[in-house]
């Protein structure tokens, strides 16, 4: 598979990249390979500044048409008779191409997925995307398709923007809704699509409310305004729905007018389509803000690295400038050394906070998941008692998987929120102990794994065929007739034709009792199958939650341990330089002072440049 082309970067990212390059040069010149490694990681993040914009909404609301119109390319399949079945990721590429993303084992029988659990891929012709992206499309030859990735040479995407076309929501409790909310939790912005045929439904408002909790930037887009004359009235009603607690802006657009405007290069028609404002929001507000955040983080890294080296040089300069005060400088550095070394201890407050926090999180997340699964089990039991599984098991399976997906997503949302809180607490304790201004590490959002669970819980449930019902009725009727005939004979009473009627009554009762017994048996089988499914989900998701928390713990531990090591080395070099300063001659001190002033001026200029990255 070809490497991803590096997109052209907007101003803030380009400035940040230049500042990081200067920081790397400074680290190399001063022999600080540890700090250079830190900036190299920042450089890699700048090289791939992915900004995810998720397009979500109910089925047949115009999501795929919106994506096509936004990008000016027919990349997402649009059809009145089919709906999008898997997410389509559209990103920048110098040459148009497409790949299928698969779950499970690779086509050659190797391990599932790629590096770090990524799905394996298979390149396909761009005009074949529709075959695999829509419901009831052609089955893929290599396994279950979980997504389609498309690369297009579009200026809008060149800054690292990724537009995600998701399947229809299908109700807040559906599996599609859980998958869409999972994508929303990792997005920088959400475009929620609803058409102008009717006002927002309760389900759509519920989804918007959940999306607003997971993502800071959510925009409602009213589509098909060229098709519905009363769209302005629908827009005004929707604006009232969205005002207040939701606080979600609304834009009205026409994808067909946009397509005509792009084809004819008609600026007036483009404004009339409503896409001018949408493009402005996507490129400037969403893409620009995300780029600014990434650039600011990179600049903060350069500043932190520079200030470590500045602190080292300033300690040496203080000892050189006033030899009489050199001992005071050494005492201060030794005190800093003691404080920094305490940061590396297992008894450090930040380390204890991390370990205790992860242990508490493990217990709380596990309890939350078990509580949710227990609630689902009770709901399923109650539902099964009111149905005949032979008639409604397919719907029951669909409901169960959707309900589990929704609750698993809620569990992961809790995990992410609590993990972020823990990260901030650890960062605060590290800052307090180090006495320096350190930025908290970003915790990667745990990816919801509800879609990974494919547990076959099919139950062989079958009603009695007509022939079997006849045999049961005949057996009960025959047994009843024989029994009453024998009793009549013993009593000296000839029942005659009455025995036939008694047999029919007994046959009917026997058939009814057998149906009840078999219905109870089917319900018991359905409940057992449901419990096996829920137990397996609890097992798989519990393991994944624990693995996620262990990854978070290692990430935080390694990050702050690395910072402690950097501070230790900076302090050690400052101590060495300050001690040597006391032994220098007057001429050597003056020469070294000039060199230090020049180096400090360069480093302070680098800090100034970092501060101007996003100004």
Image (spheres, grey):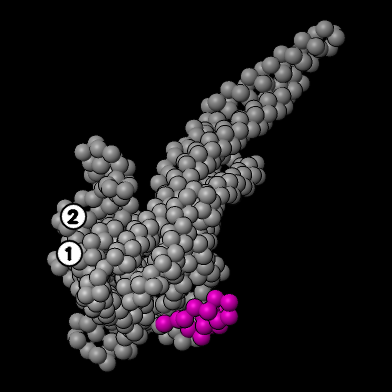
Residue 195 — which label?
Answer: none
Residue numbers of the magenta segment = 235-251
> Residue 309: x percent and y percent?
31, 68
- Which quarter of the figure is the C terminus placed in? bottom left
- Vertical arrangement, residue 292 with respect to residue 80, above or below: below
Furthest-bottom residue in this view: 268
Q: CA distance from mark 2 to mark 1?
A: 18 Å
Q: Is residue 273 visible?
A: no
Left of 208 or right of it: where is 565? left
Residue 385 image position (x, y, % from top left): 65, 41
Q: Nearest the camera: 407 or 570?
A: 570
For disc 1, the neighbor class at 10 Å (few under 14, some 14 to 19, many from 20) is: some
Q: Residue visible at 51% across and 56% down?
A: 350
Q: Nearer the viewer, residue 579 or 606?
A: 579
* Side of 71 relative to 455 (left or right): left
In the image, residue 63 sits, relative to residue 11, either above or below, namely above
- Residue holding disc 1: 5
Residue 390, image quadrant = top right
Which of these two is toward me, 40 or 81?
Answer: 40
Location of residue 444 by image quarter = bottom left
**Which circle marks residue 124 in the picture?**
2
């Amino acid at each position: 598979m070809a490497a991803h082309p590096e997109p052209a970067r907007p101003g803030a990212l380009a400035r940040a990249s230049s500042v990081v390059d200067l920081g790397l040069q400074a680290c190399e010149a001063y022999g600080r390979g540890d700090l250079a490694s830190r900036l190299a990681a920042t450089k890699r993040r700048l090289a791939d500044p992915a900004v995810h914009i998720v397009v979500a909404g109910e089925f047949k609301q115009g999501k795929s048409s919106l994506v096509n119109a936004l990008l000016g390319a027919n990349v997402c399949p649009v059809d009145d008779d089919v709906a999008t079945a898997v997410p389509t990721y559209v990103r920048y590429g110098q040459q148009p191409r497409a790949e299928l993303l698969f779950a499970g084992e690779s086509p050659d029988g190797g391990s599932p997925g790629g590096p770090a659990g990524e799905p394996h891929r298979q390149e396909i012709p761009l005009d074949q995307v529709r075959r695999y992206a829509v419901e009831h499309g052609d089955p893929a030859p290599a396994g279950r398709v979980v997504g389609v990735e498309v690369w297009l040479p579009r200026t809008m995407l060149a800054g690292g923007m990724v537009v995600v076309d998701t399947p229809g929501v299908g109700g807040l409790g559906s599996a599609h809704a859980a998958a869409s909310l999972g994508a929303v939790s990792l997005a920088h912005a959400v475009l929620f699509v609803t058409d102008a045929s009717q006002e927002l439904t309760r389900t759509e408002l519920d989804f918007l409310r959940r999306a607003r909790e997971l993502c800071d930037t959510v925009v409602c887009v009213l589509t098909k305004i060229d098709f519905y004359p009363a769209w302005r009235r629908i827009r005004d009603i929707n604006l009232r729905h969205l005002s207040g607690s939701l606080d979600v802006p609304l834009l009205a657009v026409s994808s067909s007018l946009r397509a005509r405007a792009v084809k004819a290069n008609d600026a007036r028609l483009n404004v009339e389509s409503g896409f001018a404002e949408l493009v402005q929001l996507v490129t400037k507000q969403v893409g620009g803000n995300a780029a600014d955040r990434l650039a600011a983080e990179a600049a903060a890294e350069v500043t932190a690295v520079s200030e470590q080296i500045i602190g080292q040089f300033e300690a040496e300069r203080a000892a050189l400038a006033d030899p009489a005060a050199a001992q005071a400088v050494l005492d201060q550095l030794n005190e800093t050394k003691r404080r920094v070394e305490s940061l590396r201890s297992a008894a450090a407050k930040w380390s204890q906070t991390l370990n205790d926090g992860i242990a508490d999180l493990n217990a709380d997340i596990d309890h939350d998941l078990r509580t949710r699964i227990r609630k689902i089990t009770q709901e399923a039991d109650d539902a099964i008692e009111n149905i005949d599984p032979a008639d409604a098991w397919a719907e029951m399976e669909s409901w169960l998987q959707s309900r589990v997906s929704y609750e698993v997503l809620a569990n992961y949302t809790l995990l992410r929120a609590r993990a972020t809180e823990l990260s901030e607490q650890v960062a605060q304790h590290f800052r307090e102990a180090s006495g320096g201004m350190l930025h908290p590490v970003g915790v990667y959002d745990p990816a919801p794994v509800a879609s990974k669970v494919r547990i076959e819980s099919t139950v062989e449930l079958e009603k009695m065929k007509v022939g079997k019902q006849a045999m049961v009725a005949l057996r009960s009727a025959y047994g009843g007739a024989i029994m009453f005939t024998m009793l009549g004979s013993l009593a000296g009473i000839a029942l005659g034709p009455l025995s036939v009627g008694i047999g029919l009554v007994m046959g009917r009762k026997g058939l009814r009792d057998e149906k009840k017994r078999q219905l109870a048996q089917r319900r018991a089988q359905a409940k057992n199958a449901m419990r096996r499914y829920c137990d397996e989900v609890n097992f798989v998701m519990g393991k994944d939650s624990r693995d996620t928390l262990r990854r978070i713990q290692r990430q935080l531990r390694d990050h702050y341990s690395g910072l402690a090591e950097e501070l230790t080395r900076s302090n050690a070099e400052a101590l060495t330089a300050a001690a040597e300063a006391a032994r220098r001659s007057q001429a050597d001190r003056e020469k070294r002072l000039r060199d230090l002033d020049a180096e400090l001026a360069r480093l302070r200029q680098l800090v100034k440049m970092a501060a101007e990255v996003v100004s």
